[in-house]
Image (spheres, rainbow, N blue to C red):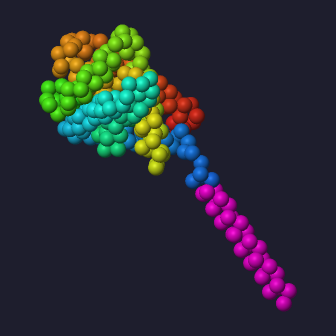
Amino acid sequence: MSEARTQEQKEQQDEGQQDEEQQKEVEQREVEERSAPSGKVVYKAILKEGEEELERSSSALFWSGLAAGLSMGFSLVTEGLLATYLPEAHWRPLIAKFGYSIGFLIVILGRQQLFTENTLTPILPLLKRKDEKTLLNVARLWAIVLVANLLGALLFAWAVARTTAFDPEIQRTFSELGHKAMEPEAATILLRGIFAGWLIALMVWLLPFAETARVWVIIIITYVVGLGNFSHIIAGAVEVFTIAAMNEASWLTVLGRYILPTLVGNIIGGVTLVAALNHAQVVAGGGGEDI
């Protein structure tokens, strides 16, 4: 009888321990679900995306990049429409600059290839492997996407400037936006390009685990880029190509004073301030051993 009671008590203790362990597992899962992902987890997600981009064919990259260049034109269109129809007031840019985000929304949610996103994603595999093969593959991706983006921006700018798709009043606003982008000296454009590249690459870093907040992350970051008049190689190219197509600026001036310094600035901001630093913080934290 005592043996049966002892066995029963032991079984009850075992069941209690099992219940306690299960409760701890449930609590641990809840903690993990409610905790923000670590830098190592974000790094791995972007690294995987970068490796997938490097495996894409040149033709796929070109057509996706061309679509992105065309889509970025809607940043100019939406901002121009808002600026045209809003009353003249000191707060007008605070509203009109929300239009700047539209092109980015289309490109990013549509999974199109944008050059400034690629200052982060394919660089992580390069920083991990540090070999010539990956370097050449990154150079291939960059060259194709940049050329395709700029070609798309050029085609869109020509359509805006040379067709009757938009009323003259709206075209004048497009022209004003283009001249505004060209106002600063080349050194200032380069510096602003660094900030733009920095912010866009940070946005890419934030997106993998933004979940339902993805749209707001894109809108907020790109709104800051637009409001700060930070130089973005593709969004800005649509603006300055438009005034060149209107014969209000020479193509040589547009390429030399805006496109080149903006390109250098975006690369510095995206590669150095985001890709390299975030790679370094993961590796320094011991996360590079099993990546």
Residue 23: image x %, image y %?
A: 67, 64
Q: Is residue 265 visible?
A: yes
Residue 132: image x %, image y %?
A: 33, 27
Which residue appears at 56% of the width and 42% of the height?
A: 38
Front-lying residue, 46 or 160: 160
- Secondary structure character of the magenta stretch overall: helix
Which residue appears at 14% of the width and 29% of the height?
A: 163
For residue 244, what is the image quadrant? top left
Q: Is residue 129 visible?
A: no
Residue 284: image x %, image y %?
A: 56, 31
Magenta-colored stretch includes residue 18: yes
142 to the left or right of 164: right
Front-lying residue, 80 or 26: 80
Q: Which region is colored magenta?
A: 1-30
Front-lying residue, 256 or 264: 256
For residue 112, what is the image quadrant? top left
Which residue appears at 42% of the width and 25% of the height?
A: 89
* Above or below, comparing residue 94 to residue 30 in the picture: above
For residue 190, what is the image quadrant? top left
* Above or below, comparing residue 178 to residue 137 in the picture: above
Quadrant occupied by the N terminus: bottom right
Which residue appears at 31% of the width and 44% of the height?
A: 110
Residue 118: image x %, image y %?
A: 35, 32
Magenta-colored stretch includes residue 115: no
